[in-house]
Image: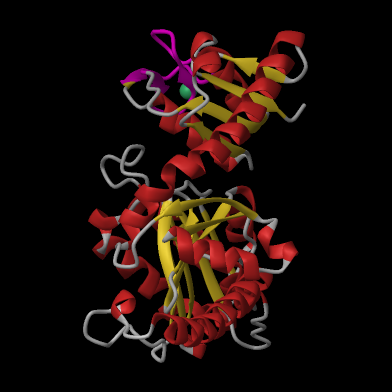
Amino acid sequence: MLNREELKDLSEIQGKENYYVSLYLNVNPVTNPKGEYVLHLKNMIREVSENTEKGVYRKIKSDLEKISAYVTSNKREFRKGLVLLSSEETGFWREYNLPVPVKNLLIVDNTPYIKPLIDIVDNNPRYLILLVEKDEARIFVVHLGEIVEYGEIKTEDVPGKHKKGGWFALAEPHYQRHIDYHVVGLHLKEVIKKLESFLSAEQIDLVFIGGSEEAVTMFKDMLPETVRNRIKAQFAAEMFLNPDEVLKRAEPLLSVYEAEKEKKIVDELITRALKGNQAVLGIEDVIGAAMEGKIHKLVFVKDYEASGFKCVNCSLLSVRNIPKCPYCGSEMEPIEYMVELVVQRAVEQGATVEVLAYETASLKEKGNIGAILRF
Ligand SMILES: [Zn+2]
């Protein structure tokens, strides 16, 4: 998974005489229904081959072949943005199959090119979910709608756990309780240490804690204030849940924060558009802005779809049924996936994209889509 630590490692790579090939490819099946990205990749590879010095080309030829083979053989499993970083010379290879779009790029340099990856991490909130019990803890990160488990902390010595009858069936409750809480305390301290080091290494926007109420309360009481202040909410969860179940359990809490964030964006968009202050609403004006390369932030309601027309030659987009492209005079073909195409154009001009999942009502009234402009 794409994370801060990984980006830091990548940023420290210096090839000196070694070369790295970095590919960013829009593989979105919606905008590439016929696998058009294979052709785009071929064109980029040809261009790089022609413009690279012979000595360097010799070094990266096998990287280009490997990348090309990867793209043509993995077609079906792609999502929206594919990122491949390769240096056969040093035995280096990374692949990121991302649920967000990327701008097509093929770059040869002495370091892997990771600026777009940094932007993706910076522009999408990351939530940490900690599940904590008296003898166990698990750390998850939610990013780009996905949950990934990062680690597990098990404290085997917690008494009661492996005895018959379990935790609550101990013979001498008072005495045992003392020992329990001592060991539990050590375990929770260990969890705090792990949590703190994780939070300092990774860019995390919010922390959520799940577990039994008793364990969560104990844990929170032991936390230093700086960490406790970052906890947004807690929820009931059992240790045995799989990551997707954990995400499902935490989702109502995450959505509160997501909705707050969305509301700010929509309010700014609509206010600016109504004042005529570098923002537009509605698909037609958004397309116009995209054609002029002016989009700074594209905002639309999740699942919003629009159809329209695309020039077969210069790819000009239009919602209106015009017989000929006003720009180059070629034919216009009908298309179903206008929003996806606009997203791709926006990403190519360096825009960020906000898909509204919760705060949708006010933008629905204004045409489901809008954009904050650069100028
Ligand atoms: Zn045209």
Residue 146 visible within the image:
yes
Residue 103 coordinates in the image, percent (x, y): 53, 48
Q: Nearer the viewer, residue 356 or 67?
A: 356
Q: Is residue 322 a member of the stretch shown in magenta?
A: yes
| Quadrant in the rendering for residue 239 | bottom left
Residue 358 coordinates in the image, percent (x, y): 48, 29
Q: Nearer the viewer, residue 222 or 272?
A: 222
Q: Nearer the viewer, residue 87 or 4?
A: 4
Count of numbered circles on the image: 0
Tell me if residue 341 comes above or below residue 250 in the rendering. Answer: above
Residue 98 visible within the image:
no
Q: Main secondary structure of the magenta part?
A: loop
Q: Residue at x 46, y 58 (%)?
A: 213
Residues drawn in magenta = 307-334
Q: What colour scheme has been applied to the protein in the rendered image?
A: secondary structure
Residue 226 coordinates in the image, percent (x, y): 74, 63
Q: Is residue 298 left or right of residue 254?
A: right
Q: Residue at x 57, y 20 (%)?
A: 286
Residue 212 coordinates in the image, percent (x, y): 41, 61
| Quadrant in the rendering for residue 133 | bottom left
Q: Is residue 346 left or right of residue 1?
A: right
Q: Residue at x 32, y 74 (%)?
A: 168
Q: Residue at x 66, y 68 (%)?
A: 223
Q: Nearer the viewer, residue 89 or 114?
A: 114
Q: Is residue 290 a member of the stretch shown in magenta?
A: no
Tell me if residue 124 comes above or below residue 151 in the rendering. Answer: above
Question: Which quarter of the rendered picture does the C terminus lie within?
Answer: top right
